[in-house]
Image (spheres, rainbow, N blue to C red):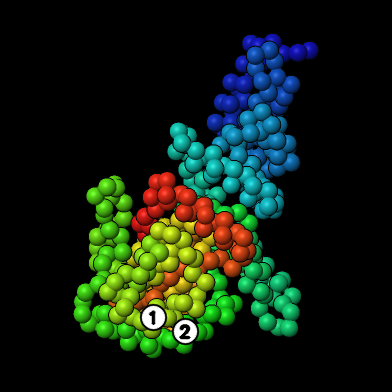
Amino acid sequence: MPLTKIQAETLAREGMAALRNGNAARAYDTLLLLKDGAPGVPAPWFLIAQAAQALGRDVEADDALVKFLGTEPRHLAALLTMAALKVRRGDDRAAQSFYRTALNVAAQPGTAIPPMLVPMLRTGESFLAEVAKRFTAHLDQILAGTRRGGGGHSPRTQQALDLLAGRTELYLQQPSMFYFPGLAQRAFFEREEFGWVARIEAATAAICGELDRALATDRGFVPYVQSTPDRPAPANPLLDDPSWSAFQLWQNGVPVEPNASACPQTMAALAHAPIPVIAGRSPMAIFSQLKPGTHIRPHHGMLNTRLICHLPLIAPEGCGLRVGAETRHWRKGEMLIFDDSFEHEAWNRGQGARVVLLFEVWRPELTLDERAALTDIFEAIDTYQGAAVDTG
């Protein structure tokens, strides 16, 4: 015989009272009478689950929580209760899913978190961190025996494993001005991939001689990020700061005098590189100086159609460049080549200035037709609104 609303409400009150008083058996038996509900009174599956869990009846608690979450899938307390139950039943994979969902719900703006749930959320965070460690150890142990020839995995395979294990983050090209689709998502390129690199590296000593003369005069270096009267000041802490400075050799597609004439061997070396020639925009080449204690904050470059090249000329210890998830360090005379449309940052924590010859080249994947089309596109953009300013 179906329960009336009054009967159901009375049973619900009795069941909740028994649960509060620690009489889980009575609470379970009473609340189970309401499993079919009554007019205006839904089945109290969450309370039934709590009583069953207190009795150690995990199967019944699991079934009750499944029914409750079927109607309220983002109920924070129920998600946390289910996660803890899955842990107790040895189902770590399911527990991870419920804990992650609970933490995502708790992180939503405007979510009110009862104080009694805070320790359960912290438990979830600790559980997920511990499971991640165990998972990583499992992967490393199993896959150690699969490496071909006793060596390590390929860099791409290792990156995939690091992403899977949560040891690194996924970074993608995010140029601030122009995105060209279909180019490889690679933060760094290796110097050995480009035949022209060796010819420029071979000129390192001559280029250093010209740099030394430029540094000795203490003229020609200007802040890399400069304010202009006809534009809003960029939100860059190094604005007009000589701690990050540039000795311009090529700027906006033309040689910068008298700097260029003072560095003939540097200019000759640059001629070996596939530098874009775009009216009003490129070539661009500078001696980039980063003084001790300076940090170039994380940012994205304007384009993903180019690569940035650094030929290190003065490379003290304590300097580094992070592009995406990978950090590298400058070594004198060894070219660093990277895609600056990835988030990147640089720092000098050393005792002396770091100086590199910085210039840009075409992405190697671009065909001659694509390079010609991009040249037309960028020139058309610039003739309409002026060239965009790279604010670092």
Q: Is residue 278 left or right of residue 255?
A: right
Disc 1 secondary structure class? helix
Quadrant location of the C terminus? Answer: bottom left
Kind of element beneath mark 2: helix
- Left or right placement of residue 381 versus residue 164 in this view: left
Q: Nearer the viewer, residue 217 or 189?
A: 217
Residue count near mark 1 (Cα–Cα under 10 Å), binned few <14, some 14–19, many ≥20: many
Image location of residue 293, percent across then percent down: 28, 70
Query: What distance separates the C-alpha of mark 2 from that of mark 1?
Result: 11 Å
Residue at (73%, 83%) from the top-left corner?
A: 149
Q: Residue at x 66, y 20 (%)?
A: 42
Q: Residue at x 70, y 15 (%)?
A: 38
Query: Where is residue 17 shown, x and y percent of the image?
Result: 56, 26
In the image, which disc is placed on residue 201? 2
Image-quadrant location for residue 83:
top right
| Vertical placement of residue 258 versus 114, above or below | below
Depth check, front residue: 70 or 361 = 361
Residue 266 is tagged as 1
Amino acid type, callout 1: Thr
- Looking at the picture, which amino acid does disc 2 mark? Glu
Q: Residue 307: which disc?
A: none
